[in-house]
C-alpha cells in the first residue's frame, strides 16, 4: 500500500515537473521574435525587408526614411523591449512605478536632475525632418506593442507580474528616446562631479601638496591626440544659456528591495566613476596600410551589462536619395533611432569619451529665515521650485519639491555623496548652505541632429557640420572616408571659466566670480584633417598640449593606453592590415608592470620562498594574458601594494581602485624610496619603499597559494579575472532562481585596467571585470565588405534565445563577426527574412 502511495506521489511530482518545464519553455519562447514570413504593421508606407544574419543582426531595407526608422523601432522592440522599458524608467525617473518604494531614492535624485524636463524641451525643438524620423521610430515600437503583451514581450514581465501585477507598459514616446542621451551623458561625465567631491573630502585630512601627489596632472611624456594644434583666429565664444533655469519648466520582498542595487547605481550613494572606464579609437591612413586606404578601429569601454548596451543594425534605403538618404550600419542603442558609431557608404567614425569638465558644483548661501532663498551678489533671491509627484507601485504617490538656483538644481537635497558634506569636506562652507550643480547636459541641445547627421554625411565637411550639434557628451571623434581621408574632431559644449578656476573644487555661488563665460567656439575646438603622421589615436588621453589657450579639463586618462596604441602603430613591422588591428585590440601589455617589475626584482628578500616565487616575473613580456602566471602574481601584488601604501591615509571611499591614475602616482613614487607615503601609519616603525614592496609580494604569494595552489607555474590570471554578465534589472535580485534565468558567466578574460584590452577591475574588491570594451569595430575603407564587429553578449535580450550570449566567446578571445554590407552578401548569409507590410 505504502509503495503504491509513493508511486502515485512520485508520478504526480513528475507530471507537475513536466508541466512546469513545458510551461516554462512556452513562457520563455513566446517572447522570441518572428524573423520569417510576413507581418502586417499598421503605419508603414510600403513593404520592408528585414534580413537577420547568423548573429541575429537585422539589415533593414525600406523605400522611405519613415519606413526605415519605423522598422528599426519594430526590430528593437522585438529583441530588447524590456531593456528599453527599464531604461526609459531610469531616464524619466519613474523606476518606482515598476519596482515600488525600493527605488524612491533613485527617482528623487533623478527628478532633481530633471532629465525628462530637459528632454521634453529638446523634443519640442527638433527640426521637422528629425522629428518625423523620431515619430516614425516611435510608431514602429508601438506597432509591436499593439500585438504583444506581458511575457510575449519578454520573460522579465512574467517575473515583474509577481511583484507588480498591475504593471502594463505604456506606449513609447519620442521623449523616451531623447531622454536616453541624458543617461549616457551622466554615465560618461559623472566622474567630474564626484571628482570635485573627492578633492574637497581629501583636503579635510591631506595638504594640497599631498592631494596633488595622488591626483597629478597629465604627464608631459605621454601623447596628446592632436599635437601642435593651433587655433586659427579669435572669435566670440558660444553664449551660455542664461535662461536655463527659467526654461526648465518573502522572496518577492527580497526582489523588491534589491532590483540590481539601483540606488547604489544611480541615486543615493554614487561613487566616483572608475579610472578604467574609457575607450580606444584610432584611424590609420593609406600611407601606412596594406590596402592604401584607411582603416578605422574603435572599442568603447563601459560597465558590464546584460543584455549589452549595444544592438547592431544596418539601415538601407533601397533607393538612396534626398528623400531617403540613409545607407548605414553599425551600433545602435535600443530605444534610439540611428547608428551611434559605424559607417555608411562613404564615411566611418568612432568615439571615445573626451571627458571635458562640463560640471561645476556651486556652494549657495541660504537665507536662514527662508530655505528657498539664496544670495546673489549681496541680495536674497528666490529659488525656482517645482513640484514633482512620484508614483509608487503598491504604495501612495510621493510628493517632492525640486529647488533651482541660477546654476541649476540643488542636488545636496538628494545626492547621497553629498550627505554630511559639511563634516567631511575640507572646503569652507557658509551656514546654512546648499550645493547646486551646473551641467551642460541640463541645457537643451540638438544631439539627435548630430547622430543623424553623421549617418548621412558623405564627406569631411558634412561630418563636421553634424558635429556642431554634438553638445554633450563630448566625444573624441575619429573619421575616415573611402577617398582616403582621415580626420579628428572634438565637439561639444565646453565651458570657459574665469582664470584661477580650474573646476576641481566646489566654488562659491553667491558672487559672479566663478560664472561660466560661454563655451569654446566650435572652430577653436581641436580638430585635424590628414595629419602628416598618417594616423590619429585617442584613448581618453589629453587632447592638446599645454599651449592650447582654453582649459578643457584638469584630468584626463593618464595616457598609458594611448602610449601603447601609438607605439604599436609607429613600430608596426610592415603595412597595417586588419589582423594587425585585431592584434592591437587584443594587446594586453601592462605598462604599469613595465615600470614596477624591474624595481620589485631588485628588492632584497630574506625569504627564499618569495625569491623563488618572484622568479616567474623575470622573463615576463608584461602581456596580461589569461593563462599567464606572472600576470596573476603581478596583479595580486599590485592590489596589495596599493592597500599597504595608501589605505592607512585615505578615506575608505577613496582607496585606490588601481586604474591609470594610480599607475602615474606610483611611477613617481617608486623614484622616492623614502617618501612619507610608504610609511604605514598603523605601525610603530617607519617603513620605506622596499619594505612595502616586499610585504606586498609576500601578501600576493600567500593569496595566490590559497586560491590556486603552491606551484607558481600553475597560477593564471584568467581564473581570477572573470566577467559575469549580470542582468541590468533583475540580475542582483537576491533570488537565486531568478538570477539563474538571466545572468551568464563567469567567463575567463585577459587584459586589465588601463591596458588596451581594457577589462578593468577594482583593486579595492575582487579581480572580477567591472568595465570592459563594450564593442569592437574594424572598418576597412578599401572594401567595406571586409569590416568586422563584435560586442560582449548577443543581439537578443531574451534569455535562452540563440543570440542571447553567442558573441561572448568571440568577444573575450578577440574575434569578430563579419560586418555585412552589400545586399547580396546580406541575403546570402541571412538566417531569417521577415517582410513587414502595411
Image (cartoon, rainbow, N blue to C red):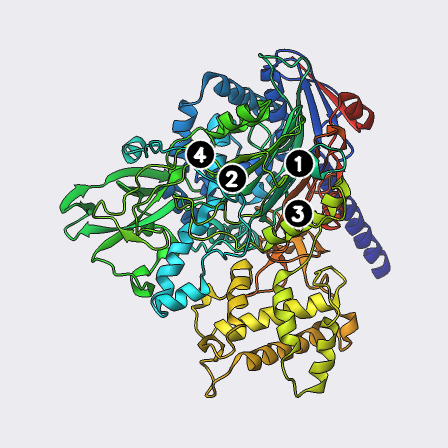
At numbered mark 1, what does the secondary structure look like: helix, strand or loop? loop
Q: For the point 43% across and 69% down, which residue is it? A: 650
Question: Pointer 4 and pointer 3: residues touching (CB < 8 Å)?
Answer: no
Side of 419 relative to 488 (left or right): left
Q: Which residue is mark 2?
A: 475
Mark earlier in primary sequence (4, 3) = 4
Give the CA distance from mark 1 to mark 4: 28 Å
Q: Which residue is mark 4?
A: 471
Q: Which residue is mark 1?
A: 285
Q: For the point 47% across and 48% down, which residue is it? A: 545
Observer able to see residue 481: yes
**Which image quarter is the N terminus in?**
bottom right
Residue 461, image x, y percentages:
53, 24
Mark earlier in primary sequence (2, 1) = 1
Question: Pointer 1 and pointer 4: residues touching (CB < 8 Å)?
Answer: no
Q: 265 and 145: which one is in front?
A: 265
Asked if residue 239 is positioned above or below residue 690 in the image, the reply reads above
Give the CA distance from mark 4 to mark 2: 9 Å
Which of discs 4 and 3 lies nearer the camera? The answer is 4
Which of discs 3 and 2 lies nearer the camera? The answer is 2
At numbered mark 3, what does the secondary structure look like: helix, strand or loop? helix
Q: 543 and 593: which one is in front?
A: 543
Which of discs 1 and 3 lies nearer the camera? The answer is 1
Mark earlier in primary sequence (1, 4) = 1
Q: For the point 65% across and 70% down, which residue is it? A: 597
Question: Pointer 4 and pointer 2: residues touching (CB < 8 Å)?
Answer: no
Side of 747 relative to 476 (left or right): right
Q: Which residue is mark 3?
A: 742
Which of discs 1 and 4 lies nearer the camera? The answer is 1
Residue 348, image x, y percentages:
63, 31
Give the CA distance from mark 3 to mark 2: 32 Å
Amino acid at each position: 500500500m505504502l509503495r503504491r502511495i509513493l508511486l502515485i506521489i512520485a508520478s504526480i511530482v513528475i507530471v507537475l515537473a513536466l508541466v512546469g518545464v513545458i510551461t516554462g519553455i512556452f513562457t520563455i519562447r513566446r517572447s522570441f521574435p518572428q524573423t520569417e514570413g510576413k507581418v502586417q504593421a499598421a503605419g508603414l508606407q510600403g513593404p520592408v525587408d528585414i534580413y537577420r544574419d547568423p548573429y541575429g543582426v537585422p539589415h533593414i531595407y525600406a523605400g522611405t526614411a519613415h519606413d526605415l526608422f519605423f522598422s528599426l523601432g519594430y526590430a528593437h522592440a522585438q529583441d530588447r523591449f524590456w531593456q528599453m522599458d527599464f531604461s526609459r524608467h531610469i531616464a524619466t525617473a519613474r523606476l518606482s512605478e515598476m519596482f515600488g518604494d525600493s527605488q524612491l531614492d533613485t527617482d528623487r535624485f533623478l527628478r532633481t536632475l530633471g532629465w525628462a524636463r530637459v528632454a521634453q524641451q529638446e523634443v519640442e525643438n527638433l527640426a521637422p525632418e528629425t522629428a518625423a524620423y523620431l515619430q516614425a521610430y516611435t510608431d514602429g515600437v508601438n506597432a509591436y506593442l499593439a500585438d504583444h503583451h506581458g511575457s510575449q514581450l519578454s520573460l522579465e514581465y512574467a517575473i515583474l507580474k509577481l511583484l507588480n501585477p498591475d504593471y502594463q507598459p505604456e506606449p513609447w514616446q519620442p521623449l523616451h528616446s531623447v531622454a536616453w542621451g541624458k543617461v549616457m551623458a551622466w554615465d560618461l561625465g559623472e566622474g567630474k562631479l564626484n571628482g570635485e567631491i573627492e578633492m574637497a573630502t581629501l583636503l579635510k585630512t591631506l595638504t594640497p601638496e599631498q592631494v596633488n601627489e595622488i591626483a597629478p596632472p597629465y604627464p608631459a611624456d605621454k601623447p596628446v591626440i592632436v599635437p601642435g594644434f593651433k587655433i586659427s583666429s579669435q572669435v566670440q565664444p558660444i553664449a551660455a544659456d542664461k535662461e536655463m533655469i527659467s526654461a526648465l519648466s518573502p522572496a518577492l520582498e527580497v526582489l523588491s528591495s534589491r532590483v540590481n542595487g539601483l540606488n547604489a547605481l544611480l541615486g543615493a550613494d554614487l561613487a566616483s566613476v572608475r579610472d578604467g572606464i574609457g575607450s580606444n579609437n584610432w584611424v590609420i591612413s593609406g600611407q601606412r596600410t596594406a590596402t592604401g586606404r584607411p582603416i578605422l578601429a574603435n572599442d568603447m569601454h563601459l560597465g558590464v551589462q546584460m543584455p549589452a548596451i549595444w544592438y547592431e543594425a544596418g539601415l538601407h534605403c533601397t533607393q538612396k536619395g534626398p528623400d531617403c538618404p540613409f545607407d548605414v550600419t553599425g551600433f545602435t542603442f535600443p530605444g534610439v533611432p540611428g547608428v551611434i558609431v559605424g559607417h555608411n557608404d562613404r564615411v566611418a567614425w568612432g568615439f571615445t569619451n573626451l571627458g571635458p569638465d562640463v560640471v561645476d558644483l556651486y556652494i549657495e548661501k541660504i537665507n536662514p529665515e527662508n530655505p528657498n532663498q539664496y544670495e546673489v551678489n549681496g541680495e536674497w533671491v528666490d529659488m525656482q521650485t517645482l513640484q514633482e509627484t512620484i508614483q509608487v507601485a503598491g504604495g501612495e504617490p510621493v510628493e517632492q519639491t525640486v529647488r533651482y538656483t541660477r546654476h541649476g538644481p540643488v542636488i545636496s537635497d538628494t545626492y547621497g555623496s553629498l550627505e554630511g558634506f559639511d563634516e567631511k569636506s575640507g572646503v569652507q562652507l557658509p551656514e546654512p548652505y546648499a550645493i547646486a550643480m551646473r551641467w551642460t547636459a541640463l541645457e537643451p541641445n540638438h544631439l539627435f541632429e548630430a547622430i543623424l547627421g553623421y549617418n548621412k554625411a558623405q564627406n569631411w565637411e558634412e561630418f563636421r557640420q553634424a558635429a556642431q550639434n554634438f553638445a554633450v557628451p563630448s566625444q573624441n571623434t575619429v573619421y575616415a572616408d573611402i577617398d582616403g581621408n582621415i580626420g579628428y574632431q572634438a565637439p561639444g559644449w565646453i565651458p570657459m571659466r574665469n582664470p584661477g578656476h580650474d573646476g576641481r573644487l566646489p566654488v562659491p555661488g553667491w558672487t559672479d566670480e566663478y560664472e561660466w563665460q560661454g563655451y569654446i567656439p566650435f572652430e577653436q575646438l581641436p580638430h585635424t584633417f590628414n595629419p602628416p603622421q598618417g594616423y590619429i589615436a585617442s584613448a581618453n588621453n589629453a587632447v592638446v598640449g599645454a599651449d592650447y589657450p582654453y582649459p578643457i579639463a584638469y584630468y584626463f586618462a593618464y595616457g598609458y593606453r594611448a602610449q601603447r596604441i601609438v607605439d604599436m602603430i609607429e613600430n608596426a613591422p610592415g603595412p597595417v592590415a586588419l589582423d594587425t588591428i585585431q592584434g592591437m585590440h587584443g594587446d594586453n601589455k601592462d605598462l604599469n608592470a613595465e615600470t614596477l617589475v624591474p624595481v620589485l626584482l631588485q628588492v632584497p628578500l630574506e625569504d627564499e620562498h618569495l625569491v623563488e616565487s618572484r622568479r616567474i616575473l623575470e622573463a615576463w613580456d608584461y602581456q596580461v594574458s589569461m593563462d599567464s602566471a606572472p600576470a596573476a602574481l603581478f596583479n595580486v601584488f599590485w592590489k596589495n601594494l596599493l592597500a599597504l601604501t595608501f589605505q592607512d591615509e585615505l578615506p575608505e571611499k577613496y582607496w585606490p581602485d588601481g586604474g591609470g591614475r594610480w599607475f602615474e602616482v606610483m611611477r613617481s613614487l617608486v623614484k622616492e624610496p623614502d617618501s612619507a607615503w610608504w610609511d604605514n601609519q598603523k605601525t610603530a616603525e617607519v617603513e620605506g619603499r622596499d619594505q612595502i614592496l616586499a610585504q606586498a609580494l609576500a601578501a600576493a604569494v600567500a593569496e595566490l597559494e590559497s586560491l590556486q595552489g603552491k606551484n607558481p607555474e600553475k597560477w593564471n590570471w584568467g581564473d581570477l579575472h572573470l566577467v559575469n554578465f549580470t542582468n541590468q534589472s533583475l540580475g542582483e535580485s537576491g533570488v537565486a532562481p531568478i538570477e539563474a534565468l538571466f545572468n551568464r558567466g563567469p567567463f575567463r578574460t585577459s587584459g586589465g585596467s588601463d591596458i588596451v584590452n581594457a577589462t578593468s577591475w577594482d583593486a579595492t574588491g575582487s579581480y572580477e571585470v567591472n568595465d570592459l570594451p563594450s564593442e569592437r569595430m574594424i572598418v576597412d575603407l578599401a572594401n567595406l565588405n571586409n569590416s568586422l564587429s563584435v560586442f560582449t553578449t548577443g543581439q537578443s535580450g531574451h534569455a535562452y534565445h540563440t543570440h542571447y550570449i553567442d558573441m561572448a566567446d568571440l568577444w573575450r578571445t578577440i574575434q569578430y563577426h563579419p560586418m555585412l554590407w552589400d545586399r547580396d552578401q546580406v541575403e546570402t548569409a541571412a538566417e531569417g527574412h521577415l517582410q513587414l507590410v502595411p
